[in-house]
Amino acid sequence: MNTARVRVFAVSLVLLGLTACFEQVAPEWFAQMKQQKAIQALEGARPLDPPPGTVPFGGMAPRIDSPVPAFSPEGMALANPVPATPESLERGKEVFGIYCALCHGEDGMANLETTTVAKRLAANGMVPPSLQAVPGYTDGFLFTKIRYGRPQMPGYPQIPERDRWHVVNYLRTLMNKES
Ligand code: HEC
């Protein structure tokens, strides 16, 4: 008799214990952590805006909305933060050689005999100008021209900002050759 009682008691204890493994406890009884108020991923919530006055440390400058951004006042007014040190000119020359020389020529002259792509463009009425003879544009103009191109030149937003300023510094050395 006693043993049977103990058995029933033990079995009910085990059964009761098992129920704890399932979520059968009413939330009104015990608060459950997963039922807290939380924003789940992809729930449509927008990340917080950075506090006012935050200075961007990476990414890209906002796009300039203009048909030819290089000629926009914002583009022209950009100031060159990179001094034209020998290292800057060397890097500018390297980047120019990668991206620009195929149309404008190694020396910026776009010699149609030696610069194959320039020759082909010229045949289609799109002659790349000699960079040694371009007018006295601002650094901001050149920087913006490289980013967006236009009207006929392709833009090179993939050239990182600092490298673009190096190219601007290098362009100045090409341009000054004539004067
Ligand atoms: C696919 C050929 C091509 C490539 C590559 C190219 N350009 Fe040009 N570029 C042109 C053509 C064509 C023009 C003239 C039409 C125009 O301004 O869009 C031009 C114009 C320019 C001008 C303006 C000249 C003026 O008087 O308005 C500058 C400055 C210039 N390019 C610099 C560069 C630099 C720097 C690079 C490299 C990052 C580069 N270009 C790459 C074809 C090219």
Image: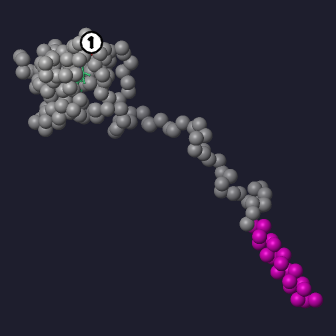
Q: Is residue 131 above or below residue 34?
A: above
Q: Quadrant of residue 19?
A: bottom right
Residue 27 x/y as whole percent: 75, 56
> What amino acid does circle 1 point to?
Asn
* Side of 93 where 38 appears, left or right: right
Image coordinates for residue 135, horizontal then vertical, percent: 16, 13
Residue 134, quarter of picture: top left
Q: 42 above or below 75? A: below
Q: Which residue is mark 1?
A: 124
Q: Residue furthest bottom?
A: 2
Residue 134 or residue 101, whichever sits in front = 101
The magenta region covers 1-20
Q: Which residue sits furthest right? A: 1
Residue plotted at (71% across, 57% down)? 31
Residue 165 visible, this orientation = no
- Residue 75: x %, y % from top left: 29, 20
Quadrant in which the N terminus appears: bottom right
Q: How is the image coloured?
A: one colour
Q: Nearer the viewer, residue 81 or 142?
A: 142
Residue found 65% across the figure and 47% down from its top: 37
Q: Residues within 10 Å of mark 1 (few under 14, many from 20)?
A: few
Q: Quick check: which quadrant has ligand 1?
A: top left
Residue 75 magenta-drawn? no
> Residue at image x 44%, y 37%?
50
Up/down of 93 relative to 9, above or below: above
Looking at the rendered structure, the number of numbered marks drawn on it comes to 1
Q: Is residue 158 visible?
A: yes
Viewer-closest of 113 and 47: 113
Q: Quadrant of the C terminus?
A: top left
